[in-house]
């Protein structure tokens, strides 16, 4: 008997229609008594607004437990539920790379000959998993919670992912090859000794050369600051209000901590205050495996809010924040990646503003830098000066650079990236102790842009002298490393940046480093107004020496003017009386620079971590 094509199609359709229709998750949860019909209707209405999985919304609202959702999924698809994972098998590691398992949202559970048991949290992912694996395997699916899958991935692939985190940035853009520059330490030491020998043999010529370079770099830095100040002062039309995107993105925020258990309760509280849909918020606290005290602090804080997770980074070298971030990046679930520090208190609506700005800006803008401010600016003199300095940086210099279309050296916190661009960049250089400034340069070299985010985060101003010097020495050493990395191939850097930005790079990094290291030579000019004879006066003449003195004085006036301009707002105006005293604050950076130079030669990868939680001020009372 023969049938035509139309009849065959009708028969296939009838066969499909006769198949039992799986019950929906919401109905199963209601039938099992885990959910009321009213709560289900409210969750479905929220799902329509957020375009998020229903299960995520129910979990985020605290209406069901992960086990209840897992049980409902098992009833819907007929799969067994995963129990405790078996011991790792070597034949599980060779099937797919760890990164591919992460992308699939699945993990190999066990294997017996050609039968592979795979755990998934979303049944509809089975087709993609099957397509990625060898056809010779028979796939048996299991249901597991996302946390169970993540724990198994750590167990099987933690070591491989940790090694990847150390070398994620391409070698050409990383400072990790410093270890292979066999003569670097000796050459730098020889250079310093040669310089010292020249000073001893011909001190006058050496002094003229060094002072000449110091004045030149001072002029360059002052010119850059003047240009940024003028660009900032030019009136600009207020931007039009931006609409919120119809489908809000999932945002992952990472906070790396190391040996700071005392900040954990406060940090969790600050992250809990963020006003963003809980079903779309992914908060990762990134800890080192050996940091038992901080890990215990998070154990004591359980249960954590929905979407808050602890990622434990396996032991390895170097033990740095960028290595930890690289490792945790693979476990992020969002399409936007945010970075905070352990003591940060962001504005509650900050992530909504991030979502809005990314949705309404050009795709070439792949990074947003928020404004940093401090909750303890009145604590002591050092905290006041630190706050004034950073007000100048975030409220005047960075906006000026942005208006001049210059690359923006990123800060280490309140940063937000489009994930696909961040992964193309290779994440962070695990060996660079100022991974933020380096990443800002790589971003610019790839032709992407950073915009400023008009939202602030409060953090702790460094208010004790030795912690301040340690922090500043790490920053200066990182600037040295970043300069050397990107200047390996100067012509390539020139091509990537263009002439104007290349000149800016020299001024911002080389001239700034020179100023920190050679500033003591400039201090000698303060002796002249008091009638003290300057050693180089015989060679330069009184007229030229006076002119050089005015360059130095003019730069100090510019520093004070820009600091006053940046602190004119009502929340910072109390700092004005302290601005003149910053002439005693900036010399501290020269002490830090000497420490940075020593470490640059003998321990370039050493991370001199900033100590958090030492302020006596409660940020929520500031």
Image: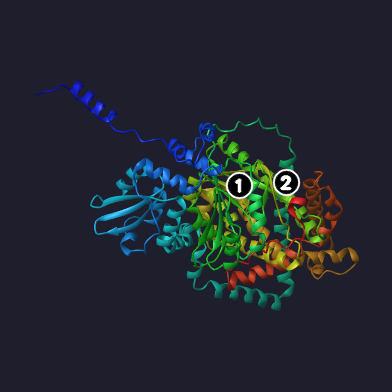
Q: Nearer the viewer, residue 191 or 100?
A: 100
Instruction: Please say whether residue 544 is visible from this viewpoint.
Output: no
Q: Position of residue 159 (x, y in %)?
A: 43, 64
Q: Quadrant of the N terminus?
A: top left
Q: Secondary structure at mark 2?
A: helix
Give above or below for 580 relative to 348: below
Q: Nearer the viewer, residue 187 or 235?
A: 235
Which residue in the structure is indicated by mark 2?
Answer: 396
Which circle's residue, 2 or 1, is located before the other in the chain? 2
Give above or below for 330 relative to 293: above
Which residue in the structure is indicated by mark 1?
Answer: 500
Q: Residue at x 75, y 53 (%)?
A: 375
Label 1 packing within 10 angstroms: few (<14), some (14-19), many (20+)? few
Q: Position of residue 242 (x, y in %)?
A: 62, 32
Q: Are marks 2 and 1 in contact (CB under 8 Å)?
A: no
The numbered disc on residue 99 is none
Q: Mark 2 against mark 1, which lies toward the viewer?
A: 2
Instruction: Please say whether residue 35 is visible from this viewpoint.
Output: yes
Q: Is residue 541 left or right of residue 323?
A: right
Give above or below for 170 relative to 24: below
Q: Can you tell which quarter of the image residue 60 is in?
A: top right
Q: Position of residue 333 (x, y in %)?
A: 49, 47
């Amino acid at each position: 008997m023969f049938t035509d094509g139309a009849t065959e199609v009708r028969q296939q359709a009838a066969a499909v229609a006769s198949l039992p229709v799986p019950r929906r998750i919401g109905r199963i949860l209601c039938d099992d008594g885990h959910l009321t019909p009213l709560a289900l209707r409210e969750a479905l209405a929220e799902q329509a607004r957020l375009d998020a999985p229903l299960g995520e919304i129910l979990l985020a609202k605290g209406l069901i437990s992960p086990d209840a959702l897992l049980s409902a999924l098992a009833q819907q698809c007929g799969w067994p539920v995963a129990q405790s994972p078996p011991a790792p098998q070597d034949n599980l590691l060779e099937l797919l790379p760890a990164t591919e398992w992460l992308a699939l949202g699945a993990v190999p559970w066990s294997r017996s000959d050609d039968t592979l048991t795979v755990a998934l949290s979303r049944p509809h992912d089975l087709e993609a998993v099957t397509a990625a694996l060898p056809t010779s395997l028979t796939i048996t699916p299991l249901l597991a919670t996302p946390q169970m899958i993540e724990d198994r991935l750590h167990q099987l692939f933690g070591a491989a992912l940790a090694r990847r985190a150390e070398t994620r940035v391409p070698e050409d853009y990383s400072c990790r090859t410093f270890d292979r520059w066999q003569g670097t330490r000796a050459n730098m030491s020889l250079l310093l000794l040669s310089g010292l020998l020249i000073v001893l043999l011909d001190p006058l010529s050496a002094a003229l050369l060094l002072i000449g370079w110091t004045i030149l770099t001072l002029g360059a830095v002052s010119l850059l600051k003047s240009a940024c100040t003028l660009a900032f002062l030019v009136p600009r039309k207020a931007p039009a209000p931006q609409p919120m995107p119809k489908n809000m993105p999932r945002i992952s925020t990472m906070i790396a901590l190391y040996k700071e258990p005392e900040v954990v309760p406060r940090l969790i509280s600050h992250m809990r205050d963020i006003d963003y849909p809980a079903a779309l918020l992914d908060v990762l606290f990134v800890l080192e495996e050996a940091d038992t005290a901080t890990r215990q602090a998070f154990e004591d804080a359980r249960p954590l809010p929905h979407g808050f997770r602890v990622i434990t980074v396996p032991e390895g070298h170097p033990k740095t924040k960028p290595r930890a971030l690289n490792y945790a990046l693979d476990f992020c679930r969002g399409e936007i990646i945010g970075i905070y520090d352990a003591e940060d208190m962001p504005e509650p609506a900050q992530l909504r503003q991030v979502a809005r700005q990314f949705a309404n800006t050009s795709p070439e803008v792949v990074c947003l830098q928020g404004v940093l401010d401090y909750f303890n600016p009145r604590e002591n003199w050092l905290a006041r000066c630190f706050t004034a300095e950073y007000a100048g940086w975030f409220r005047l210099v960075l906006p000026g650079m942005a208006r001049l279309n210059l690359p923006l050296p990123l800060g280490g916190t309140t940063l937000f990236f489009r994930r696909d661009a961040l992964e193309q960049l290779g994440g962070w250089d695990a060996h660079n102790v100022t991974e933020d400034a380096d990443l800002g340069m790589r971003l610019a070299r790839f032709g992407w842009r950073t915009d400023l985010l008009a939202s602030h985060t409060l953090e702790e101003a460094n208010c004790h002298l030795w912690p301040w010097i340690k922090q500043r020495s790490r920053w200066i050493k990182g600037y040295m490393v970043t300069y050397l990395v990107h200047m390996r191939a100067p012509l390539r850097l020139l091509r990537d940046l263009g002439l104007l930005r290349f000149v800016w790079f020299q001024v911002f990094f080389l001239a700034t480093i020179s100023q920190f290291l050679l500033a003591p030579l400039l201090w000698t000019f303060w002796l002249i107004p008091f009638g003290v004879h300057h050693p180089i006066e015989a060679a330069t003449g009184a007229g030229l020496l006076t002119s050089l003195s005015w360059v130095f004085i003019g730069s100090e006036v510019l520093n004070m003017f820009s600091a006053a301009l940046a602190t004119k707002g009502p929340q910072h105006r109390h700092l004005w009386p302290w601005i003149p005293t910053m002439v005693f604050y900036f010399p501290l950076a020269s002490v830090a620079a000497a420490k940075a130079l020593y470490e640059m030669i003998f321990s370039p990868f050493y991370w001199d971590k900033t100590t958090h939680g030492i302020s006596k001020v409660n940020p929520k009372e500031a």
